[in-house]
Image (cartoon, helix red, strand yellow):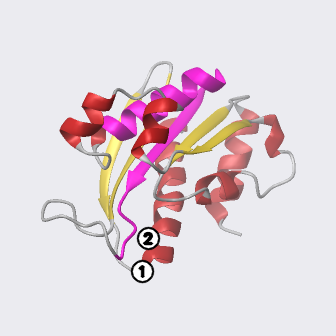
Amino acid sequence: MHDIVNHIHKLLIKNKKTIAVAESCTGGELSNLLTQISGSSGYFILGVVAYSNQAKATILNILTHIIAKEGAVSKDVATAMAEAVRKIAKTDLAIGITGIAGPTGATGKKPVGTVFIAISSKRKKLCKKFYFKGNRLTIRKKAALESLELLKSIMQ
């Protein structure tokens, strides 16, 4: 188990915060990390894998024109995913992840490994763009772990 998983577990419990996640390219990897430790039901409320654009629009109510304009792999979509899942689950915090795990799906402007991670709370919104190297599995794992690092940074 990763140290960051333990650290986030303790932070969420200590601060009495709840969390929900909306994942795309990580395919549930982040939900898996957040629920590895017994007692995670005290803070983990909902994990959604909204893999298709249709799921992003129908389940998370992300406006289709945002997806069409910016692309599913974008700051706007990651931020909208985090905000939507936080509202749906009524949690203190939420994470939205969208990206290209590869090996296909890349474009000239968005190579394989491009991932946007957004954090949403009542007071803060944060979204960062990352370029992860490696194969599909490695990119998914790195994105999930980096989202926990980002969460840690706003909770400290």
> In the image, is residue 137 above or below residue 13?
below
Q: Indicate the secondary structure of the residue bearing disc 2.
A: helix
Would residue 10 be found to the left or right of residue 149 on screen?
Answer: right
**In the rendered structure, which amino acid carries the disc numbered 1?**
Asn
Relative to residue 130, is residue 23 drawn left or right? right
Pointer 1: what residue? 135
Q: Residue at x 52, y 45 (%)?
A: 50
Q: Nearer the viewer, residue 111 or 7?
A: 111
- Whole-percent x, y for residue 16 in the image: 73, 28
Residue at image mark 2: 139
Q: Position of residue 135 (x, y in %)?
A: 42, 80
Label ID, residue 79 = none
Residue found 49% across the figure and 27% down from its top: 84
Magenta range is 76-103
Residue displayed at 35% across by 69% down: 132
Q: Quadrant of residue 65?
A: top left
Res 105 quadrant in image: bottom left
- Whether residue 96 is visible to the viewer of this picture, yes or no, is yes
Q: Are marks 2 and 1 in contact (CB under 8 Å)?
A: yes
Determine the secondary structure under disc 1. loop
Query: So how many labels did they put on this image?
Result: 2
